[in-house]
């Protein structure tokens, strides 16, 4: 059964290597900043401007599931662990989801920090 939700978030982060993506994912889950992180195994191709030039890169996409109250701390941790000068960190509000999954998500990020 779907439940309305205003507190859960999905955060997109891209990384230059699979090793970095795995390291960041593991750390934020261990620290209860995200309940789950999906790592897209096939690289995505990103086209963007950087320092006035159009660039292209192969990156690994992370989808982090968290609660709104942890966004600032999650962003700090991603920034601390990430190799990019300006890592992507974009949060989307979850408006609905399965009641069981949303309860699990909230419970996972509510645990005490390690």
Image (tube, rainbow, N blue to C red):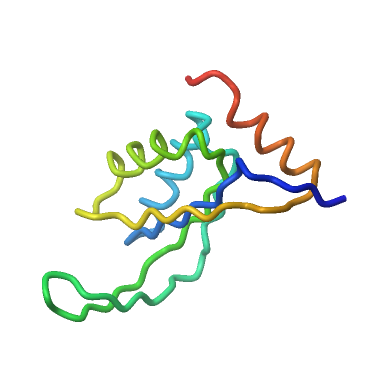
Q: Is residue 2 above or below residue 76?
A: below
Q: Is residue 6 left or right of residue 98?
A: left
The residue lying at 48 percent from left, 29 percent from top is 31
Residue 102 in the image: x percent, y percent?
Answer: 72, 42
Residue 64 x %, y %: 52, 49
Residue 77: name its quadrant: top left
Residue drawn 80% across and 43% down?
Answer: 99
Name the residue located 55 percent from the left edge and 41 percent from the top edge. Answer: 66
Q: Residue most toward the left?
A: 51
- Count of labels shown? 0
Question: Does 93 sit left or right of 46 as displayed?
Answer: right
Point 39% across, 60% down: residue: 14
Q: Position of residue 27 (x, y in %)?
A: 44, 36
Looking at the image, which is closer to me, 15 or 86? 86
**Can you give x and y, in whole percent of width and height, for residue 84 in the image?**
24, 55
Which of 11 and 69 lies nearest the eye of the viewer? 69
């Amino acid at each position: 059964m779907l439940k309305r939700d205003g507190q859960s978030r999905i955060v997109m982060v891209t990384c230059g290597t699979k090793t970095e993506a795995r390291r960041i994912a593991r750390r934020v889950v261990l620290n209860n900043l995200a309940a789950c992180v999906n790592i897209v195994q096939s690289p995505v191709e990103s086209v963007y401007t950087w320092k006035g030039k159009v660039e292209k890169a192969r990156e690994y996409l992370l989808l982090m599931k968290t609660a709104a109250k942890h966004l600032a701390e999650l962003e700090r941790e991603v920034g601390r662990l990430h190799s990019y000068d300006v890592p992507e960190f974009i949060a989307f509000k979850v408006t609905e989801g399965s009641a069981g999954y949303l309860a699990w998500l909230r419970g996972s990020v509510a645990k005490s920090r390690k």
